[in-house]
Amino acid sequence: MSERETRRKPRTVHVGRVLRTERVSPHMIRVVFGGEGLSAFGAGAYTDHYVKLLFPAPGVTYPEPFDIGAIRERFPRESWPRTRTYTVRAWDEGARELTIDFVHHGESGLAGPWAAAARPGDELRLLGPGGGYAPDPAAAWHLLAGDESALPAIGAALERLPAGARARAFVEVEGPEEEQKFDTAGEVDLVWLHRGTGPVGAALVAAVTGADFAEGPIQAFVHGEATFVKELRRHLRHDRGLAREQLSISGYWRLGTDEDGWQAGKAEWNRRIEEEQEAPRP
């Protein structure tokens, strides 16, 4: 065993077994996982909890017990499981049920087609959860903005709002058939924006930049396609004067690349955006 192997701390890999699936909208599939493989899983502190789903490389059998670190050290890269990051839509600790919503656009992609074909009893390994955002009770009001990829986290946040908490949520989807309903105790102004054949994020940027902001401390959650997230970050930081601490903002994906490509360059993208936008204006 190498020195690197002795120092490496194994990451907990959970196994979810499909219990049931539901077509929430034409392009959103809900998969509920359960089983003993989730006995060590835990979530609940955040409304943007996420997991890394592990899809086996075609034709590759991994040794048991499954160890993702050892696989990445001993297998060629093309044989590694492919990871896809998904928000935890809900976690029921008592029932040990993990709910994940998948955007599905036909046979393109990896996770969407898997969800469309998933049947009770199918299993999928996953890592996590991570996360870092939840509605702050101290905020006077909440701004939430995102596309379909952020919809599960936005829904979870709205459902977490306490009675009387104020929020404005802007969600861009393809059309009215993609809208969803949420149970919330908060005072929520939910604005659905229909993209149609327009560019991703254009309607969302226009709506947020043109919105009237209420008085008082704001907490903002803005996630989705990286290009519009960049525009809204600049707007919220410079035009609206929000501090970094008031923002949970990040690109979940980037148009024109899959998650493998996006994750490879995401850190550098974020670093450059922060340098550009945090630099003092002349």
Image (cartoon, rainbow, N blue to C red):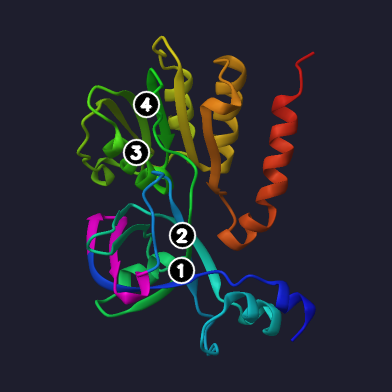
Which SS class for mark 3? helix
- Report the Cα–Cα distance between label 4 and label 1: 31 Å
Q: Which residue is mark 1?
A: 126
Three-letter residue code for mark 1:
Leu
Quarter assignment of residue 96:
bottom left
Three-letter residue code for mark 3:
Ala
Q: Which residue is mark 2?
A: 51
Three-letter residue code for mark 4:
Pro
- Report the Cα–Cα distance between label 3 and label 2: 17 Å
Q: Which residue is mark 3?
A: 157
Q: Compared with residue 192, is residue 180 higher up or lower down, i.e. above or below?
A: below
The numbered disc on residue 137 is 4
**Location of the C terminus (image quadrant):** top right
Region rendered in magenta: 22-39
Q: Nearer the viewer, mark 4 or mark 2?
A: 4
- Going from the N terminus, do you reach mark 3 or mark 4 first? 4
- Report the Cα–Cα distance between label 4 and label 2: 25 Å
Q: Residues within 10 Å of mark 3 (few under 14, many from 20)?
A: many
Pointers 4 and 2 in contact (CB under 8 A)?
no
